[in-house]
Amino acid sequence: MSGTISSLLYLVSGVCFIMALRGLSHPSTSRAGNYYGMAGMALAIGTTLTLPVVQSYEVIILGLLIGGAIGAVIARKIQMTALPQLVAAFHSLVGLAACFVAAAAFYRPDAYGIGEIGAIKVGSLIEMAIGLAIGAITFTGSIIAFGKLQGLVTGRPLVFSGQHPLNALLGIALVVLIVWLCATQDPTAFWLIFIVALALGFLLILPIGGADMPVVVSMLNSYSGWAAAGIGFTLGNHLLIITGALVGSSGAILSYIMCKGMNRSFISVILGGFGGESEAAAAGGPGGDRSVKSGSAEDAAFIMEGASSVIIVPGYGMAVAQAQHALREMADTLKAKGVKVRYAIHPVAGRMPGHMNVLLAEANVPYDEVLELEEINRDFSQTDVAFVIGANDVTNPAAKTDPASPIYGMPILDVENAKTVLFVKRSMASGYAGVENEVFFRDNTMMLFGDAKKMCEEIVQSLD
C-alpha cells in the first residue's frame, strides 16, 4: 500500500476515534461511539498490516489471535462491578507496551530508522526516554490502582514521612537520567530510568485514598494515552501519535472536571498528593454504641407509596448486588402510582467515571431522569424520600463538617436534607474511604439492611 493511501486511511481512522470520544460523552450516543471506536481500530490494524515495513505475518497473527481470544473471554465473563479494575489493568498493559517498544528501539535502532547502536538520534532518544518513563509510571501506578479497586490493597491512603520530598527527588533523578542517556547512550541510564519510573508509579498512587480512585482511573487513562503517543513517535506512526494525544488529553480534561467537582487540586492528582493528607481515615468518628432506626421492605414501600417525589441515589453497593434492573422496576412501579422519581449521580459514585450511568443505562433507565450532582442537589430539601442504594462516601456529611476526614472538601449529595432517607446497606460498615457515615444516625433516616437487589424486589412486591 502506498504512503498516500495509508495516510488517508489513518486519517479516517483518527476521525473515527474522535467520533468515538464524542459519542461516549453521553449515554444516549455511547453505543454509536463504541461502534466508531471499533471501526477505527479495525481500520488502523488492517492498514498497518499492509505497510511495506511488515515483512513477517506469523508472529503478528499469532499475537492477534492470542490477544483477541483473551479479550473475547474477558468481555463475555467480566461483571459490571469489575469494570473499573479491568480498565486499570488495561492501562497497565499500555504502559508496559510502551516500555517494550522503547527497549526494542534502543537495542535495534536500525529497525526503526533512528540510527545505529551507540549513535541514535538525540531527538529519538528523548522521545524514547519520555515514553519509557511515562510507560513505567503508568504500569506500576495502574497495578496499584487495580489492587485498591480489587481489594488486594487497602483503600485507605498509605503515607509515610518524607513521601513528597522522595517523589520530588525521584522526579529530578528521572530528568538527570534522561540527560545522561541522551549524552552517553549508556544502557545503564536506560534501565535506571525504567527502575526509577517504576518506583515513582508505586509512590504516586499509594497515598491516594479509595474515595478518590475514580479520578485516579481517569488520570491513569491520560497517562496511558501519552505513553501510546510516545510509542507513536518512536515508531514514526502518525496514527498512534494522534490517538495517544486524544486519549491523553481527554483523560486529563476528564480528571480536571472531576477534580473541580470534588474540590480537589488537579496538580495534586498529577503529583499523587491528594487523599493522603490525613494518615488515618476517620474510622468511625463518634459512632460508638449509637443506635439507628432500621426498617423492612414493607416499611419502605409504605413510605414511598405515600410520597410525591423520590430521588434515588445509586452507589457501588448497587453494582455489587447487580440491583439496577430491580431498582428500575421499583421506580416504574412508583411512577405508575403517580410518584415523581429521579436519579442523582455523584461524579465519583462507583469506582470509575460514569460507572453508575453505565449501570442505569444497562437497565434502560430513561436518560432524562438521571441527573448530576449540580443539577439535583438543591432539590433534596423539597423531596419526600431520598432512596440511597449502596452509596456511602458520596452522601457523607463529614465531607463538609470534619476537616480531619480524608473526604473533607468533596462535594456530596445532600440526602440528609430530604424529609426521609431510606438507606439500603448490608451492614453498618464504613465506606471505601473508611469513614463512618453520619447520615446513618439522623432522625430522618431508616436503614434497610440486606442485599440491595433482594430489597428492591421485596419493595416491588409490597407496592404491588
Image (cartoon, helix red, strand yellow):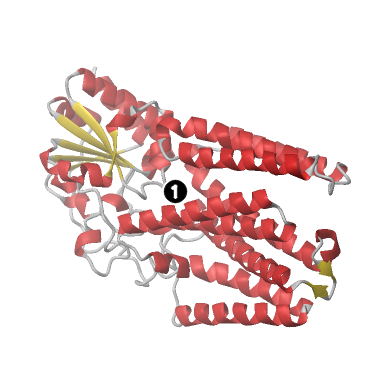
Residue at horizontal 42 percent and vertical 42 percent from the top:
355
Position of the N terminus by quadrant: top right
Instruction: Name the residue carrying label 1.
Output: 352
The percent coordinates of residue 219 (x first, y second) are 48, 58
Q: Is residue 301 visible?
A: no
The percent coordinates of residue 311 (x first, y second) are 22, 36
**Is 214 placed above or below 457 here?**
below
Position of the C terminus by quadrant: top left
Judged from the image, the secondary structure of the residue bearing numbered disc 1 is loop
Q: For the image shown, how many numbered marks are present on the structure?
A: 1
Frontmost residue, 304 versus 233: 233
**Is 429 placed above or below 286 here?**
above
Describe residue 447's horizontal placement relative to residue 106 as left or right. Answer: left
Describe residue 119's horizontal placement relative to residue 449 as left or right. Answer: right
Which quadrant of the view contains residue 13? top right
Within 10 angstroms of label 1, few (less than 14), some, or many (20 or more) residues? Answer: many
**Is 37 placed above or below 190 here?**
above
Residue at horizontal 58 percent and vertical 38 percent from the top:
16
Describe residue 303's horizontal placement relative to residue 86 as left or right. Answer: left
**Is 260 placed above or below 13 here?**
below
Residue at horizontal 25 percent and vertical 52 percent from the top:
412
Residue type at the position of mark 1: Met
Frontmost residue, 203 versus 241: 241
